[in-house]
Amino acid sequence: MRVVIAEDLFLLRDGLVRMLEAFDFEIAAAVDNGPELSRALAELEPDVAVVDVRLPPSFSDEGLQCALEARRKRPGLPVLVLSQHVEQLYARELLADGTGGVGYLLKDRVFDADQFIDAVRRVSEGGTAMDPQVIQQLLTRRSQDKPLGNLTSREKEVMELMAQGRSNAAIAAQLFVTERAVAKHTSNIFGKLDLPPSDDNNRRVLAVLAYLDRG
């Protein structure tokens, strides 16, 4: 699996390279600025991109804008964002096209290699890997809006775990309920959000997140 990394801090970039290589990923490129990231994504066509939001030369949203442009040219390009903060606008932009293969992790909340590698693999396979704090802010932003406001507390818990990319079995284990109960909550969620249910975990999560982004 070929990866393009974009991170301006040398030690972190080098650490990402070494960790991914240790898990048999091929590093197609490891760059430290926006222009090089754009070239790498266009020319190397990686299986997944791991990018920081803020890169030289602007140190604003350079990394994500490069990734978004690459996704416009190559729909569905898997992108995992690593950021120091929850950037709601950036998260909404990344999720807006609903094509899957997206993740948003906070750097200081990645606690071990297995967690990070699982996120990279999940995103590369078209799934989602969203930090709970990112999801919580997206949910909080719309918490007073209908029909999101009609969800029960348990349904909101299920939706947050869905958005992290969890399967029904994983959600059931986390909440200490049965898979049948999770399936019922999921059905209720889609009914209240006026979204068609789907057996495709990734599509249903992206549909929920796309809904939360509207308006």
Image (cartoon, helix red, strand yellow):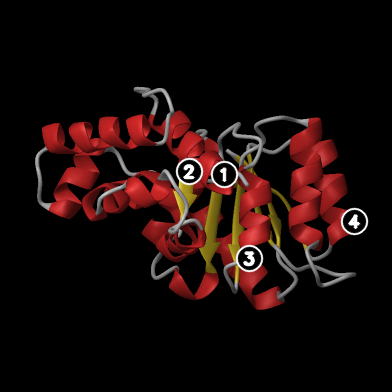
Disc 3 vs disc 4: Cβ atoms closer than 8 Å? no
Within 10 Å of disc 1 (Cα), the crowding (few <14, some 14-19, many 20+) is many
Return the residue at label 3: 87
Residue drawn 52% across the image and 47% down it: 212
Q: Quadrant of the N terminus?
A: top right
Residue drawn 61% across the image and 67% down it: 83
Q: Mark 3 or mark 2: which comes first in sequence? A: 3
Within 10 Å of disc 3 (Cα), the crowding (few <14, some 14-19, many 20+) is some
Q: Residue 141: where, in percent of width, then height?
A: 52, 61
Mark 4: amino acid: Pro
Q: Nearer the viewer, mark 1 or mark 4?
A: 1
Measure how far apart labels 1 and 3 are at the Cα level.
Answer: 15 Å
Return the residue at label 4: 35
* Residue placed most toward the observer, 19 or 186: 186
Disc 3 vs disc 2: Cβ atoms closer than 8 Å? no
Task: Describe residue 199's horizontal placement relative to residue 15 as left or right.
Answer: left
Q: Nearer the viewer, mark 3 or mark 2?
A: 3
Residue drawn 63% across the image and 65% down it: 87
Q: Residue 45: where, in percent of width, then height?
A: 75, 35
Return the residue at label 2: 128
Q: Mark 3 or mark 4: which comes first in sequence? A: 4
Return the residue at label 1: 102
Within 10 Å of disc 2 (Cα), the crowding (few <14, some 14-19, many 20+) is many
* Residue placed most toward the observer, 135 or 13: 135
